[in-house]
Each structure stands twice: as C-alpha cells, then as structure tokens.
Image (cartoon, helix red, strand yellow):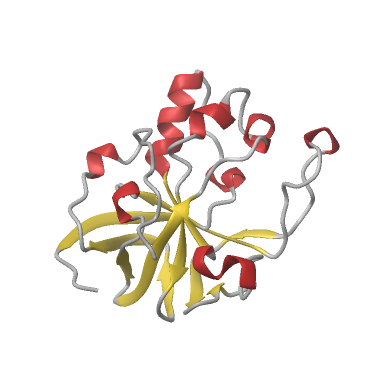
Amino acid sequence: MTASYRYDVEILHLLVSSGHAYFGRTRDGAAEVPTTDAEQVDVVSGKGIVGDRFFGKAAHMDAAVTLMAIESLEAMAAELGVALFDPLLTRRNVVLRGAQLAPLLGEEFALESRGGLVRFRGGRPAHPCAWMDQVLAPGAHAAMRGRGGMRCQPLSDGTLHRGPAVLISPVPLDPGKAGKATLLRASRLP
C-alpha cells in the first residue's frame, strides 16, 4: 500500500459475536448470541477478527471485517426522527467516527491504533438487511442503503483498540461526508 493521506478518526466500538443474530423471519425475533463491545480485537490476515462469526469462513475471506461510520447512524436517526440507534445492533465490527469509507472500496488502506497497524482491502458495500426495520426503527432499512458501511479483507495481523486512531488511505477522503448516503461503486478488484 502506498499511503498518501492520514486522517484522525476514533474507533468507537469493536463488535465481536460468535454467532449470527439476524436470520429467519423477523417475527421470530433475533437470536440470542453472545456479543461483546471489546476494548481491543485481534485481527488475523485473511481470516478476520478472532472470535467473530466470520473468522476463517471461506465464503467471507474477502469480507470478514465490517466497518461503518457512526455519522451514518446519526444521519439516519435524524431523518427518521428517533434517538440515536445502538450501533451494536447494526452488527458491524468496527464503528468509526470521522471516516468516509466509500472511496476505499477496492483500495488497500490501514487503521493504526496505539502504535499498531492493521491493513485491509475494501471489498464490497455492507448492504443493510430487512432486520434493520425491526431492530433499529421502521424505515431504517431504506435509510441505511448506501451508508451501511464496508466489508473488508484483513491483509495483516494486528490489534485494533477503541479510542483515537489514524486511517491511512491511498486516496483522498472527505471526513465531512462520512454520514452521507452514497451510491457505493462496485469493487475495483479483478
């Protein structure tokens, strides 16, 4: 990765869950699965976050870690006229403040926290599921389209910590657009 741009961000939440909570019919309710908002998570290259439901799963190797900007949830809540949603209900692994993610699709980038560095490749948009209307608020599914975050492939081993961090990007970003709905372009991966 040839990084040219550094952005101060904050890692607000690090979600680790050993199982899928949203499957089946919403009328049956979400599954009760252990979920942790960790102080730190260990990331393994090509596998994901240790202990998470996507760790080492072949079908998710290119999208094992999900990132989302808290500004997206803040904008959605304002549009829907509700209090801020619990970010953990989105089931995104890494919730950041100050990170415009859409331009990172198909790009190699890194998150640096407490001196450690974890490299990622932006894989594909993290599209919302219909469960968002039930667990967040009516209308959340539609409001989350284009700003549900990004699924990534971890390219290096390392540890992410909650708190101040630096997003290292090969392309210019606009942190002021972190919460804007964006038509996310398709991945530029071959």
When the figure is inspected, residue 170 is found, relative to residue 74, above or below; the finding is: below
The image quadrant that residue 183 belongs to is top left
* Residue farthest top in this picture: 81
As drawn, is 119 to the left or to the right of 29?
Answer: left
| Residue beneath the point at 17% across and 53% down | 172
* Residue farthest front in this picture: 190
| Quadrant for the N terminus in the image | bottom left
Residue 161 pos. (x, y %): 42, 67
* Residue farthest right in this picture: 28
| Residue beneath the point at 30% across and 66% down | 109
| Quadrant for the C terminus in the image | bottom left
Residue 94 pos. (x, y %): 47, 57
Residue 19 pos. (x, y %): 72, 61
As drawn, is 135 to the left or to the right of 68?
Answer: right
Does any portion of residue 84 appear in the rendered image?
A: no
| Residue beneath the point at 47% across and 79% down | 45
Residue 83 pos. (x, y %): 52, 26
- Relative depth, front residue between 108 and 6: 108
As drawn, is 57 to the left or to the right of 189?
Answer: right
Number of marks: 0
Does any portion of residue 16 appear in the rendered image?
A: yes
